[in-house]
Image (cartoon, rainbow, N blue to C red):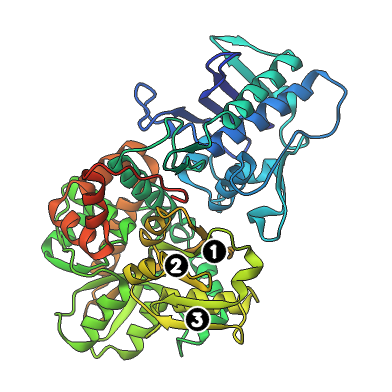
Amino acid sequence: MVSAAELNIWISSVTSPELFRTEFRHPKLIEPAIAVRGKTAGAETGAGTFQWTSAVRGLTILILQHAARCSDDNKWPASLYGEQGSLAASLDYAVSKQPIWLTDMFGIDRTGTCLLQSLIERTNPGQRREGPVGISLRTSSLLPQKIKILIQGSQITDPTTLIQMSLHIARGEAEQPETTSKGKIPKDELTSTEGIQTWEKILHETFRQELDAVLHNPAVFSKPGILQACSIINNNPAFAQISSSTLHTLDSKLSGSEMFGGKFADASKILQLNSPLSIATPVFSIGTIAILKELEQQGLSCFRHGYHFPHAVEMTKQFLEGSCESPDLISTTVPVAAHFLQKSRTPYRVLMFAPGITQRIVAPKNLGIANLKSGHYLFLSESPSQGTYYFDSLKHHNLVSESKTIRSNMEPVDVIAALQSGDKDLRGIIFFPHYQLSCLNHQLRSLELLQSGGISEGVFLIREQHVNNDKLIRAIAIALRHGWLSLLEKTDKRTAVLDAIMNDEEYRLFAWRSSGLYSLEETVQSGKELLPEEL
C-alpha cells in the first residue's frame, strides 16, 4: 500500500504512441490496479482490459501532458477541452458512465466509485449546457512526479518529448479520414481506427458496452448502498406517480459475506433441492441473462428461463392478462415492477436489485439540447414503463416542457421507422439495443440528459409463496450475487458469457426478430456496409 497516488503507463513508441498497459497505486487500494490493452488479459492473469478508444486516447493525452509538468515551472494543470465528438467529450462521457475498463484501470473505493473521480476536475460535465467540456488532473491528488511514462523499459521524463507524444495522439485522431463515399466515419467509444466495422463486430461491441454499463451497480453489494438506492427511487417524483407504496428489498437480511455471494456452495445445494425455479426476463435484459449464463457455466442449472418477451412492458402485460404462467422470479425494471406489483393477482415481492437496461433520447442529429424541450415524443407510454418514467424525470428536471410536448405510444421498432422519416419534430425514448440501431441512420443521434446515466434500475421479483422460506430466499440472493460478481471481477468471464449468448440460436432468433436486427443482418449480408455514428 502507498501513501499517495502513483501511476505507471506503458507506451508503444515516441513517434507512434499508443497506450498498452497501466498500473495504478492508491492508498485506498490494497493491490495495484493493472490493465492491459486487448479483449482479454492474456498472460497478465487477473488484469483488467481496455481498448484504444477515443476516451482512452483522451486520457493518455491528459496523463502525458500532466507528467510533462514534472520538470517545468508551469503550475497550471494540464487540461483537455473539446466539443461533442472530441476526445475530451469521449473521456468525459466515460467518467460519467464509469465503464468497467475505467474501474479496471483505476480501481474503486468502498462506495463503488472509480478512483479516477478523485483525481480530476471537470468543466461542463456531461455537456449539460452548450459549449465544450473540460477535464484536468488535480496536481494535489496525482503529483506529476508520481507518474512514470515507460517505453521499452525506459522512463521518458523530457517534457518536450512528452508533449510531442501527446500531440502525435491528438494529430492521429485529427488525421483520421472524415468521409467516405458512404458518409462520415464515426469517432466514438465503439468505433475502431480501421474505419468501417463488420456487422458482427458492431453487434458484439454494442452488447458488450451494455453489459459493462448495467453490471456496474455497487449499491447492490452493501446494506447502506441498498438503502440509499431505495431512498433515491422513493424520493423521485416520477416514481411516486406510478407507485402508491415505497420500494424496499428482501435481501437486507443477508450477512456481510452473503452480500458478496459468500456461502455459494451451500446456496447451490439448497437451490438444487428446489430446482427448477422459473425466471422470466426480457430478451434485452442482457445483465440478468449474463448472470444466469455464468451460473450455468459454473454448474448451477436450477434457474429455468427462455426468450419470450421483447421488453418488460410486454412481459408484465402477458402475466397480468393470464396468457402466461406466473414464474417463481421476474427480472424487470423498477417502473414496470411498481405497476405490476399493484395490478398482479399473483402476489410478488421485491427480492433485490437486478441489472437494469440503458435508454436514450433519439433525435435528429442537428438538434441542440434546448430543442428537446418541445416536440412529439414517441415511446412505450400506454402503461408505466421505463419510457414513461424517463419522460417524467425529464419533466421534473425541466428538460422537457409538458405544455410544448405531445407523446404517443409506440413500439421501439416503430419508433426507429418513424424517426428515419426525417420529421424534425419527432423524438424517441428507446432502450438498448434500439437506440444504438436507430443511429445507424446518420441523420439521428442518441442523447443522455439525466445523472442516472440513462440506466433504468432493475429488480428481481419473487413470488410471495416463497417469502417465508428464508433459506431459499438467501440462497437465490447469494447465487445471483455470486454470478454478478464473477462477471464483474473477470473480463474473460464477461467475454465468454457474451459469446455464449450471441451464439445461442434460440436467443438470436427471438432477439433479432423482435428488434429489427434480423433485417439489418440481412442488409449487411447482401453487401451493404454500415457506419454506426452513435453506437
Q: CA distance from mark 1 to mark 2?
A: 8 Å
Do labels 1 and 2 touch, CB within 8 Å?
A: yes
Point out residue 434 in the picture as x, y percentages from the top left corner.
36, 61
In the rendered view, does 250 fall on the left or right side of 506? right
Q: Nearer the viewer, residue 176 or 281?
A: 176
**Residue 314 versus residue 178 in the image, above or below:** below
Q: Secondary structure at mark 2?
A: strand
The amino acid type, in three-letter code, at marker 2 is: Ser
Q: Which residue is mark 1?
A: 452
Q: Residue at x 37, y 49 (%)?
A: 206
The amino acid type, in three-letter code, at marker 1 is: Ser
Q: Which residue is mark 2?
A: 456
Can residue 230 be spotted in the picture?
no
Res 201 quadrant in image: top left
Q: Which residue is mark 3?
A: 239
Point out residue 215 in the picture as x, y percentages from the top left corner.
40, 53
Point out residue 20 in the picture as x, y percentages from the top left corner.
49, 23
Do labels 3 and 1 touch, CB within 8 Å?
A: no
